[in-house]
Image (cartoon, grey):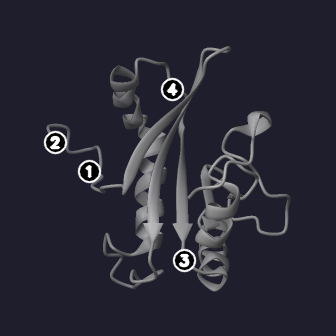
Amino acid sequence: MPDRRIQEVQFTPDAVFATCDSVEPKTCLSFLEVDRGTETMASPKRAMTDIRQKIISYQFYFRSARYKRYEGIFDCSLRGFRLLFLTHSLGRLTALCQLVQGTPPSDFVWLTECSRLFPDGVSARIWARGGDLQGPAQSILGSLCCRAPLP
């Protein structure tokens, strides 16, 4: 990067997508990280495969507004994004939620597990916003949430 004062952020999400409201001119950008339980939660080396470091990198990406490059791709105006973590078990979900809550600001990080995703669908109230498993489950579509089971 030409400006050395700006920290370089390198990560490759498993998916990037945008949901658009056809009535209101609103678009929500989402980055998906599929956690298979193979990555270290937090290591002293702070490697990029360390989930804590990934979250920190996404926080920097959020603060630096570099996500705005997707405005041209999705032909919209963006005010932020969501980082969605999909994991394979309740135990791993619980551990990830604790990590997310211990790495503020983390309200933009939403988490769920496969056993919730497939019966109810991605748009249902299955997400732990900011790692809050005690609060009510949220939908990435907000008030437009709907149950849409996946095959």
> Where does label 4 land, which residue?
78
Residue at horizontal 68%, vertical 66%?
116
Q: Would you say 124 lies left or right of 31 here?
A: right
Q: What residue type is labelled 4?
A: Leu
Asked which secondary structure carries label 2, the reply is loop
Q: Are marks 1 and 2 in contact (CB under 8 Å)?
A: yes
Structural crowding at the residue carrying mark 4, measured as other residues with C-alpha within 10 Å and reported as few (<14), some (14–19) or many (≥20): some
> Where does label 1 land, which residue?
8
Give the Cα separation between the discs numbered 1 and 4. 21 Å
Mark seen at residue 25: none
Asked which secondary structure carries label 3, the reply is loop
Q: Nearer the viewer, mark 2 or mark 4?
A: 4
> Where does label 2 land, which residue?
1
Snapshot quadrant of residue 50: bottom left
**Between disc 4 and disc 3, whose residue precedes?**
4
Give the Cα separation between the discs numbered 2 and 4. 23 Å
Q: What residue type is labelled 3?
A: His
